[in-house]
Image (cartoon, rainbow, N blue to C red):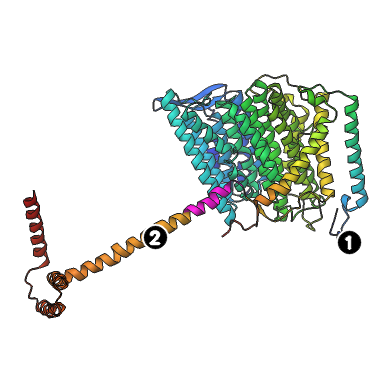
Amino acid sequence: MSKHPPKVDEKPGMFDNPRNVKRLLYTFYGCVVLLLLVDLVYHKHTIFAWEGAFAFYSVYGFVACVILVIVAKYILRPLVMRKEDHYDD
Amino acid sequence: MTINVLPPALIMILGGLLVPLFKGRSRQAWLLLLPVVSFINLLQITDGSHWVFPFLSDQIVLARIDKLSLIFCYIFHLVAFLAALFALHVKDTVQNVAGTVYAGAAIGAVCAGDMFTLFVFWELLTISATFLILARRTERALGAGFRYFMVHVAGGLCLLAGIIMQVQQTGSAAFDLIGLGTTASWLIFIGIGVNCAWPMLHPWLSDAYPEATITGTVFLSAFTTKTAVYALARAFPGTEELIFIGAAMAAFPIFYAVIENDLRRVLAYSLINQVGFMVVGIGIGTALSINGAIAHAFNDVLFKGLLFMSMGAVMYRTGKINATDLGGLYKSMPWSCAFCIVGAASISAFPLFSGFVSKSMVMEAAAHGDLRWVWFILLFASAGVFHHAGIKIPFFAFFSHDSGLRCKEAPPHMLLAMGASALLCILIGTFPQYLYNLLPYATDYQPYTVSHVLAQTQLLFFSALAFTLLLLAGIYPPEIRSINLDADWFYRKGGRLVFRFCQSTFDGLNAWANRIFAQQLPSALSRFFADPGGNIQNYGLRLWAEATGHPDHEGRHAQIISRRNRHSAYPVGIGVLLAVLLLALVSLLLYLR
């Protein structure tokens, strides 16, 4: 997580220790799996039928964000990105 | 109405103008006191129309107090106080005055009972906001401020044209339900749309807000767009066009937000995205959806203000705002970081945070109306907003790679303002009933059902999973120092094109006219009139010589003519010559007739 090692006289921050970052990530992955499993047990009361389908919200959230990033990076950025001084002439 | 009560906007606006009279601590106290006094004054005003004056054939209503205007008044007073607290260190008189007057103008606009009053406060919003941008005093801010002003003046004129036509046609200036149909209503609709940052009309927002002063942006994020949301809720509820406009607003800015480097600009894009939800809600037009739109406006003022405050605090301490320059600040600014995360959780609509209890009302209203595509787009926007505002903002500012920046925590007044906003976000999210009681329609909406909490948590966690995996895989777009073209390109580059076109055509025309009329013609005339008789003879002589083919004659006669000239042998002056010519012309004309 940190490219620059902290100065020696400084107390290292929580995330300077890679083990803490790992712990956080594994907790997060655990939550994600748990949330997915809940869908097996609990059936949501919904308005649209597809909302109740297994993992609908999980898959939608994941796919939406992947599409968002891919489109923004590979389609929008080449179209609109310019140098910082584009308007300064 | 007792005699002690003043029109709702008066205290903030007059008080703002009196700010220069105060210095130092007394000015700080004055700035904090104004929203409080104004709020107490507001509470004394009863429901209904007050301060009604005859105007032309109609009447002016300075204050129309009902549930719709009141809830906006409440949140505007609240945020005016919080923003004043956040800006307590600012000694710049321009900003102090502009911020207070700006808040007052917004309060005046949402209380306006007629369209003329609305228009006056609408323009006051533009003017005071422009000063908050210009007060940054950088070249970029100057440009952005002028563009902001031009766009809003154009929008304001559109609104004014609509108002005048509307009053002509209906004979009433009352600001109530208008509905789309006539040209007048379209003009009003678009005029409001400019302030509401509709797609293609939006770039003033993403252009100017990140260029304003640190504290100015906090003010700006609250008032202009929310006033427009109020105006739409008042005049165009249930207008179908708004559903599509709102859906577009909710969706497109998130793509820009993902690749944007300036974190305040990321927030500006997410502001458009959030207003999109409100516009959809107003467009659907049911009690639930309008309640949702207004509740979301209320919450958005708080959490977007909080996010702009936290980024402002970072900028105040480090002088930097680009994601490329920041990172690792959680060690230096732990409180700001925590408050920022509360704001991020609120805008992302995490359960127990304010966004959750209002955004879902709009979503549910869309589902009840069976607006499937709109619902899918809004759900996409909900996942996307978590992605760029919920994760990106705190992550790149406070975590990510260690930028090596070490600074002090934000000053106490900033922490207080952020802390109070964060607390309110959590309180509203946890006890939404207090907010629901303020809404224009009675509601028994229940956000905390197991299904809803579960669905939203799954959506958000898997969005976060996508972010994490993309980041670890190196696919997440790296922050790059750059700017991204937006619709402002049309007037920024287009404006230059028009300028160059005008320059080449009109300057060419000018140069030509200058050459002919200012230089050549006068000199030719002065040469001729130095010796008119001789010149005419010489010309005639030349013609005659060419016609007869005896050029040698010409030289001889020319000598004679020039000798006569030298001796002033032509007794006929120019005046007489002209008179003779005129007479000849007149007799010729008479003869021909």
Indicate the quadrant where residue A30 lies.
Answer: top right
In the image, which disc is placed on residue B508? 2
Q: Nearer the viewer, residue A26 or B320?
A: A26
Between the residue at mark 2 and the residue at mark 1, the CA separation in whole angstroms equals 68 Å
Q: Are marks 2 and 1 in contact (CB under 8 Å)?
A: no
Say above or below: B25 vs A31. Answer: below
In the rendered image, residue B149, in percent from the top left (x then y), is placed at 52, 45
Looking at the rendered image, the disc whose residue lies closer to the viewer, 2 or 1, is 2
Question: In this image, B430 relative to B529: left or right?
Answer: right
**Looking at the picture, does residue B65 appear above or below residue B139?**
above
Q: Chain of mark 1?
A: A
Please say whether residue B94 is visible from this viewpoint. Answer: no
Secondary structure at numbered mark 2: helix
Q: Amino acid at mark 2?
A: Gly
Residue underneath mark 1 = A8
Compared across the picture, whether B463 is left or right of B571 comes to right
Bounds of the magenta segment: B486-498
Q: Chain of mark 2?
A: B
Amino acid type, label 1: Val
> What label does residue B389 carry, if any?
none
The residue located at (53%, 32%) in the rendering is B189
Crowd rating for badge 2 (residues with CA inside 10 Å; few <14, some 14–19, many 20+): few
Residue B476 lies, in percent from the top left, at: 78, 48
Question: In which quadrant of the rendered view does residue B460 lie?
Answer: top right
